[in-house]
Amino acid sequence: MAALKNLSVKSKIFVFVGFFQILTFIIAILGTSGLSRMEKEVTSISDIYENLEIRLTRMKYHVTLRRNKVLQITHSPKKEELDELFKAIKESETTIENDLKGIQTYISSNQKIFKKNDLEKKLLEILDKINLNLKEFKETTDIYEKSTRELLDYKTRYYRKIELERRVSRAFEDKAKLDGIILKLAYDFSKHTSDAFQDGKQNIGITSASVKGVLWGGLGVCVLIAIILAIVMLRTIAIPIKEAETMANRFAEGDLTINIANDAGDEIGKLMRALNKAAKNLSTLIKNIGETADHLASSAEELSATSRNLADGATNQASSLEETASAITEISESISYVSQSARDQEKEVLETGKYMKELSRSIVEVSQTARSLSDGSNSVLSEAKDGQVKVDESVKRMGAIEESSEQISEIIVVINDIFTQTNLLSLNAAIEAARAGESGRGFAVVAEEISKLAARSQKATNEIDELIADSISKVNDGKSITGQIVESLVKILQKSKEAAGMSDNIASQKKIQTSSNEKVMKSVQTLSQMAEAISRATTEMDLSAKEIANAIEQVNIVAQNTASSSEEMAASTSELALQSEKLSELINAFKVN
């Protein structure tokens, strides 16, 4: 049971269904076994009927048939029917003999069937007696056949015929009792086999009763096991589900004190333990909520009183701040007047400083322009000299390029001569290959390829020659342009020297004017700084006054808002206290103790 409790509900259902299937299978096996036994008994009776009764009945029929044929022979037989009669008699005797052998064989091979009351022994004794009488049957048949044939022979004398008739009649009278003996033995045998039939029927009845007993017993055991399984299912599945339902209903009613123990390892046991844990946690939670609601109600009352005091203080503070704001406004107006005067003075000073700065800036710009011009002239002079040197170097290199191009042209002429000789060689090779016929075909192909290669090389050489000629032409153009550049650079050098002299004169005059301007600018800057300091101070005072006024106004607004909020807070705390009381009433609906 402990192992069953820890199984899942699904596994339990599988186990119960499996038990039912096994019980059904056992009942089926028992029923099949009983039917098999009954089938064996019925088969045994059927074998007795097929192997004994049918043969025995056939044997009786042929005994009677033989007797009738013998009577036909003894009473005025006809010669033309004699062969058929004796043939029928012998066939009947053969059939009787075969049936006797079949019956003996069946009895010997099925001794268990005839074991009861020494039935086998009795039946075999009867069969032995029938066999003895059957031998006399055969001997009598020989006498009948021999005597009858002699009797019907026309050569037989009269007194012999009378003697033969007497012999046949005497033989018939002597052996007629054999038919009765055989039939009586057959009836005795049939009686014993009917006893075997009865035994078989009795065995079938016993087997049927035992099968019924086994089936009913198996059914009873199955019903008992089914009841046990139903009880187990009820205890392990149905009752825990009912307990879970009860627990859920108690939860719905607000009762959290219920705790139903269930240590099963299946889903229902886990559910019950989870419900117990949930009940415990909910109970603790509701207790905490109740305590919190009580604290909240008391805190709400305290907060309401504090809010009313805060509202009164904020109202008084707002009236004081309005008086302070009016005084600050008067101070701000005085500061604004002083600040405006300082701004006007600063503006005049700034205008003067502006004019002096523009004059100084103009002088500086003239000086910088002169200096830049002087530096530019010197730079141009230096660059012109470097350019002249580089132009001379370019002219030299162009001459070297021209000489190299002429040398390459000479080399190309030599290459063209080589190509001409190669073409002649390939032509001679082709001629020799043609003379050689098939053996020179490969040589002809090589000669053709050499000829094609020479043609492509000559084409490339011609293109190089054209490019070199074009290069020489462009080098000559570059030399002429370079000569013109040299002349221009010489003129630039002369003009640069003149500009450098003028720039030096401008620089000396700039120094004198700059010293005078610096003295004036110092005075203007000092005056501007003083005016700016006064203006900045008054501006800062004005801003501070405005900021103070704004701050006082904001504090006044805050004080008014604080008073309003305090009144609202007092109302809210009253409402909070009411809600806390309602929450306590709701919590009291739960049973946690």
Image: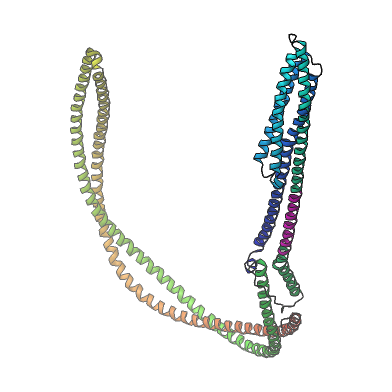
Is residue 215 in the magenta section?
Answer: yes
Is residue 239 in the magenta section?
Answer: no
User: With respect to residue 51, does 327 lie above or below?
Assistant: below
Characterize the magenta stretch by its predominant secondary structure: helix
> For residue 571, which quarter of the picture?
bottom right
Query: Which segment is the magenta one?
Result: 205-228
> For residue 405, which quarter of the picture?
top left
Camera-side residue: 520 or 171? 171
Q: Residue at x 55, y 83 (%)?
A: 544
> For residue 409, which quarter of the picture?
top left
Camera-side residue: 161 or 557? 161
Q: Is any atom of residue 65 visible in this view?
A: no
Q: Residue at x 23, y 42 (%)?
A: 483
In the picture, measured across the screen, residue 361 lies left or right of residue 344, that is left
Name the spot of residue 317 as percent of width and height, x first: 65, 89
Camera-side residue: 348 or 157? 157
Direction top: furthest residue: 155
Name the spot of residue 119 as percent of width and height, x first: 71, 43
In the picture, measured across the screen, residue 194 lies left or right of residue 372, that is right
Q: Quadrant of the C terminus?
A: bottom right
Q: Is any atom of residue 46 visible in this view?
A: yes
Name the spot of residue 105 as percent of width and height, x first: 66, 36
User: With respect to residue 496, does 128 lie above or below?
Assistant: above
Q: Residue at x 64, y 61 (%)?
A: 11
